[in-house]
Image (spheres, rainbow, N blue to C red):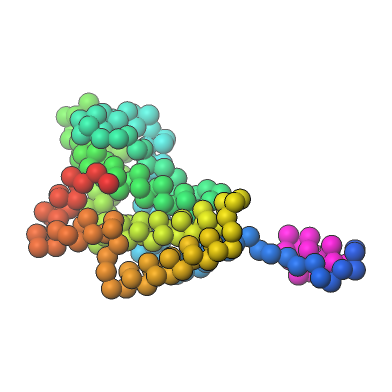
Amino acid sequence: MVGKKAGVVKRLKDQTNRAFIQGIHCSAHRLELSFKDATTDLSLWTKASNLLLSVYLFYRNSPLNRSNLLQAFAMEDVEVLIPSSVGGTRWVSHIKRTLRNLMTSYGPIIQHLQQIQNPCDPAHNKESARKAVSFLKHLQDKSMVAFLLFMWDIVCCLSAVSEAFQRKEATLRDVYVEIQLAKNTLTNFYEMDGPKLKRLTATDDNSESDSLELYEGHHL
């Protein structure tokens, strides 16, 4: 719609001979594109995105896996948040939801993935067990968990800006304030951990395995 050669804006200018017509690229969309550009060559994000998608499909495509995960939630007595898809029309918000669902449900998911490794378990399935081994390898890797929490902090910050762009009643001042807050928050992340990542790094005095076990008990 904003193409320089045949976009809507260019055609309106040509057909009306009104050069003052200006095209404005949706600010929320520009934010999405900026995030995508910033993460395109980030191999760890590529690996994390593939993990998020695979875990989502693992539960979406198998009623048995989903049912057993629900049982794990019941045993932990926590809010049910099934892994969700990364993609969507509002990409940053979808990533925020996906990271929230996975990391908030970390304990029940780990419990279920470990459970289906047992050949004597009624829910055991060779294919699911094989995939679960791979998921556990990544989800019990402290560096991967730390990165997912770090990205959760990032997208929480960016989502606030995106939502400000999309509010019909928002003024230029409101948007400016949100942008400045986001810039300050992201700058602070160079020197200190965000609130989500702190849940893991607060246990740095413990061993790696203890740290993850302590995180597993957090319900964010």
Q: Residue at x 15, y 49 (%)?
A: 213
Using the image as rendered, state which of residue 171 and residue 213 is in the foreground: 171
Task: Quadrant for residue 188, please give it.
Answer: bottom left
Which part of the image, by quadrant, shows the N terminus? Answer: bottom right
**Percent coordinates x, y for residue 144 in the rendering:** 28, 59
Q: Residue at x 41, y 51 (%)?
A: 96
Q: Residue furthest left?
A: 206
Task: Quadrant for residue 5, please give it.
Answer: bottom right
**Percent coordinates x, y for residue 79 in the rendering:** 30, 35
Residue 174 shown left or right of residue 119 in the figure: right
Q: Is residue 4 magenta?
A: yes
Using the image as rendered, state which of residue 46 and residue 99 is in the foreground: 99
**Percent coordinates x, y for residue 176 in the rendering:** 53, 66
Q: Residue at x 21, y 57 (%)?
A: 200
Q: Is residue 102 magenta?
A: no
Residue 145 in view, yes or no: yes
Task: Please count the marks in the image.
Answer: 0
State which region is magenta: 1-14
Above or below — where is 147 with respect to 52?
Answer: below
Above or below — where is 177 with respect to 57?
Answer: below
Using the image as rendered, state which of residue 101 and residue 18 is in the foreground: 18
Residue 33 in view, yes or no: no
Q: Residue at x 39, y 61 (%)?
A: 154
Q: Residue furthest top?
A: 122
Using the image as rendered, state which of residue 10 and residue 67 is in the foreground: 10
